[in-house]
Amino acid sequence: MGAMYSTVEKAYPRPQMVRKTWKNLDGKWKFAFDDAWNGAKAGCPEESRMNRVIEVPFTYETEMSGIHEEAFHPCVVYSRQVELSKSDLAGHLLLHFEGSDFETEVWVNGCFVGSHKGAYERFTFDITDAAREGENQVAVRVIDSNSLSQPRGKQRWVPENFACWYVQTTGIWKTVWMETVPEGYIDGLKLTPDLGHGVIRIEADLTIPSEELTEWMLQAEVSYDGTCVSTAEGSVRGGRAVLEAGTVREGDVRFAFGPICWSPENPALYDLRLVLVKKDGQNAAAIDEVQSYFGMREIGIRNGKVLLNGRPIYQKLILDQGYWPQSGLTPPSADALVEDIDKIHAAGFNGLRKHMKVEDERFLYWCDRKGMLVWSEMAAAYEFTDSAVRQFTEEWMQVVKQNYSHPCIVTWTPFNESWGVPEIRTSREQQAFTEAIYHLTKAVDPMRPVICNDGWEHTVSDILTLHDYEEFGEHFAERYADLAQIVSGDVFPCLDRPAFADGFAYHGQPVIISEYGGIAFSQKQEGQWGYGGSVKDQAEYLARFRKITEAIQDVPYIVGYCYTQVSDVQQEVNGIMTGDRRFKLPPEQFAEVNGRRTAMHR
């Protein structure tokens, strides 16, 4: 059950590749706005000019940063001192950023160590040559913009919030940390379950020094609930090792029917220990070791249904934007991530669609551990340019690679509602872009469904997803009585947008209503909104939620839904909870509706 993660602090930011020693650099940093920076200035930002203190990883726009200024600033700078010991420098010293929005430049002791463009994925710099024993200065400059070619998700690009776009996120917004690794080390993992053969396929990227007459091996030990299940070993070739390890222990009754499968009802996790071994003649030494985990599960599509481990699954999802009132896109604590998952489960949902955001990887760990299905989505750009195509593609592929091994992720959703591809219905160029992303994603991950473009105007897509904020259940039932009318474009579920872009057609894909509801319920209505008319009390809220959800559940060909949304976000008040996570109805009332038997199971 992922026991190895508890051997390190729960704050450890990379839960599927754990080392015992690390330094968390979150906390107080010196900080300043650098609005005069014009892109031509070079060199390390001067600490003497940093006249504020900020609490990393919260951005200056948030209360928890200690600054709370919501006006946009195009450039921000940070600095802090880090004490390093001799042991910290006994190998390669890596500096990790879990997320920084948008262009990040880093100096250590005045030496430039690297830059990165992109807001949502982890990136790393090897700072060995710049670091020294004792005090070290880490300085960071982050440049942001209001460009619509920049993947920005729900971040506004104008001075004020509007519709469903909110205060921007600028600078470091996820954990910053360090770790020391040896001369040869494990750099990345890709873990692929194979239920049919009862094995886990392990692909490891490795950083190996060039040494003659030296052989490197990767050893794996798989265990379940503290019991060793299997061991395996593979050679390192070209900085990469590929091996397979068994997931069934002979003679153990727990494995009588094969691997123990991961599912929402039984989120079984295997532990995985990996050791990089250096062999020189007859001598062998363990150089690096990481702890990981995986789940054995299989996702498929057959006869208009989504299958999990060979069985049809009805997905009862909720849209999760991952915003908090005091901290914006950054979770206020690790406990806040767990609280959201537990409350989503309490309301009777078996999964979530993480919307326009790549969440903290610790969130995925807890979804793995607690059995929460996840649709992983990319933050959208809002115009179609060569720059947008390049940046989106690079970031998305890094996100897929980073989060590939989490069993909770069951669907990839790179595009939403034609955002960033506004002419996709007729534009062959924009259609080709979504097709390219689909096939690139499939090249890395052929096992999960990929959706292009969620909501309407689909091109190539494994699931037909539709957004429909109809507030009356009887109207919904009438609209979806005939699937042929929906897929032909004779009936538009939302905003006069057809189900498919021109030149694309339905080929029997599963149908999921991936956004609906959005019921506005708030005691303070000025400047707030939701979908359809707002409700005045809990009774009206429950009645509307019940009628529209039951209407969806009663359509035989629909195999899942996603309700909008987990919590209120700034001016948008259609959450089942307020922004501070107080339920608007007792959670058991939502659960009773979600627990109703669907047409698929009748």
Image (cartoon, rainbow, N blue to C red):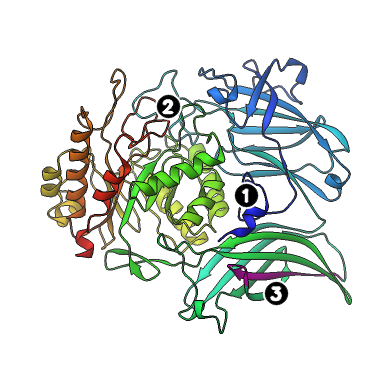
Q: To which residue does mark 2 refer?
A: 166
**Mark 2 Cα-neighbour bin, 10 Å: few <14, some 14–19, many ≥20:** many
Q: Position of residue 171 (x, y in %)?
A: 60, 29
Q: To which residue does mark 3 refer?
A: 233
Examine the rendering and report whether any part of residue 457 can be seen.
no
- Look at the image and say whether residue 154 sits in the magenta stretch: no
> Predominant secondary structure in magenta?
strand
Q: Residue at x 60, y 64 (%)?
A: 271
SS type, badge 1? loop
Which circle, 1 or 3, is nearer the viewer?
1
Residue type at mark 3: give it.
Glu
Q: Do callouts 3 and 2 mark residues in contact (Cβ within 8 Å)?
A: no
Q: Quadrant of the C terminus?
A: bottom left
Query: The magenta stretch spans which residues?
Result: 214-227
The vertical placement of 577 against 247, above or below, is above
**Mark 1 Cα-neighbour bin, 10 Å: few <14, some 14–19, many ≥20:** some
Q: Residue at x 39, y 28 (%)?
A: 165
Q: Earlier in the sequence, mark 1 or mark 2?
A: 1
The quadrant holding residue 302 is bottom left
SS type, badge 2? loop
The vertical placement of 57 against 32, above or below, is below
Q: Residue at x 50, y 78 (%)?
A: 255
Q: CA distance from mark 3 to mark 2?
A: 50 Å
Residue type at mark 2: give it.
Tyr
The residue sitting at the bottom extreme is: 251
Image check: 368 left or right of 6?
left
Q: CA distance from mark 1 to mark 3?
A: 24 Å
Q: Do callouts 1 and 2 mark residues in contact (Cβ within 8 Å)?
A: no
SS type, badge 3? strand
Q: To which residue does mark 1 refer?
A: 14
Q: Do callouts 1 and 3 mark residues in contact (Cβ within 8 Å)?
A: no
